[in-house]
Amino acid sequence: MDRYLEAYQTVTGKVPPVAAANLTPLFDQMQAGQVVPPRGQQAVELGFTAHTFNDRRENPAMYDYYQWVTTHVITGPINELTAKLIGMAFTSTNVIESNLPQPLTLNPWQITQLETALITAKQAVIVENNGIFIWLAHRHPEWPLINQSGNDFNESSVQMIQKIEQAGVVLTYLGDLDSTGIRIAAQLFSVLKKTSVDQFMALQTPQRVVQWLSLYGKVSSERTRSVKLEPQLFQEEVNSIHVFGRFVEQEQLIEPYEQLIADWLV
């Protein structure tokens, strides 16, 4: 039994949950002060769903074990990339010219006054998930990325997306493959004026959705319910999710994302 498991069982009197040993390499990285990804990415890389370490309802025993070890055993600060970007007006990296460090967050007043000439990117990938956005930005600091912040359709964010599109930036999108994720994609697309649906979903095509569902899909009736969406491309994707009865979280797709984005930006 490794020291994390032993400490947990000795101090709490609880038996560590099944698969708790899978967390040992992650805890070793934390203890060594290495940079670790946002918690959703940590969980998926260890074989759990993205909310396992953030939401006790997902897996109570594993959540308790993770929280206990990181609080009572890991010494020193944990060098974890934060995904707490929701509530900010607009966050992107390498899209807007600035002397400030990237990623760059603009508030509503800055967005209103931003000159189009400062939008220097030619292409940009919109990423639904905060954690995936910041992890990709960390791994590829030169990439032009836009954080969608999930279902956070605040007026300033929409205004900035439209301003970027009007500046001629080619936009494409990546998000969770569940009913809500496709609905978010369709809702964001509806505020664009110049971008075709084929361009917007150039990386997350219906064919790739089927492939990813086949390779990585997890069963859930709640996350794969039937919904009505427009244009038809979004309906095709959500139909596939419903028929398969499976969903895929963005955290599961880092490896294919990196290749697809690299090729698309060439």
Image (cartoon, helix red, strand yellow):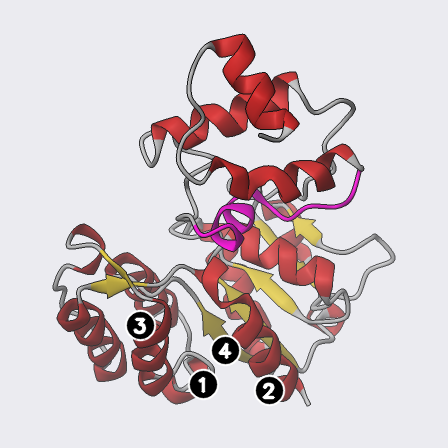
Name which residue lies at 55% across and 26% down.
5
Q: Is residue 214 left or right of residue 158?
A: left
- Real-space Cα distance between discs 1 and 2? 9 Å
Q: CB under 8 Å between callouts 1 and 4?
A: yes
- Relative depth, front residue between 64 and 124: 64
Q: Is residue 120 left or right of residue 47?
A: right
- The three-letter code of the residue at mark 3 reads Leu
Which secondary structure, mark 2? Answer: helix
Decide which of tag 1 and tag 2 comes sooner along the chain: 1
Which secondary structure, mark 3? Answer: helix
> Could you classify mark 4 by the number of other residues whose Cα lies within 10 Å: few (under 14), some (14-19), or many (20 or more)?
many
Judged by depth in the image, the label closer to the viewer, 4 or 3, is 3
- Real-space Cα distance between discs 1 and 4? 6 Å
Q: Tell me if residue 194 can be seen.
A: no
Q: Which residues are magenta?
A: 33-47
Name which residue lies at 20% across and 54% down.
220
Judged by depth in the image, the label closer to the viewer, 1 or 3, is 3
Name which residue lies at 57% across and 71% down.
255
Name which residue lies at 56% across and 82% down.
260
Decide which of tag 1 and tag 3 comes sooner along the chain: 1
Q: Is residue 152 left or right of residue 164?
A: left
In the drawing, what numbered circle is on residue 172?
Answer: 4
User: Residue 198 in magenta?
Assistant: no
User: Residue 45 in magenta?
Assistant: yes
- Real-space Cα distance between discs 2 and 3? 22 Å
The residue labelled by disc 3 is 213
Q: Is residue 265 left or right of residue 171?
A: right
> Could you classify mark 1 by the number of other residues whose Cα lies within 10 Å: few (under 14), some (14-19), or many (20 or more)?
some
Image quarter (top left, top right, bottom left or bottom right) of the N terminus: top right
Decide which of tag 4 and tag 3 comes sooner along the chain: 4
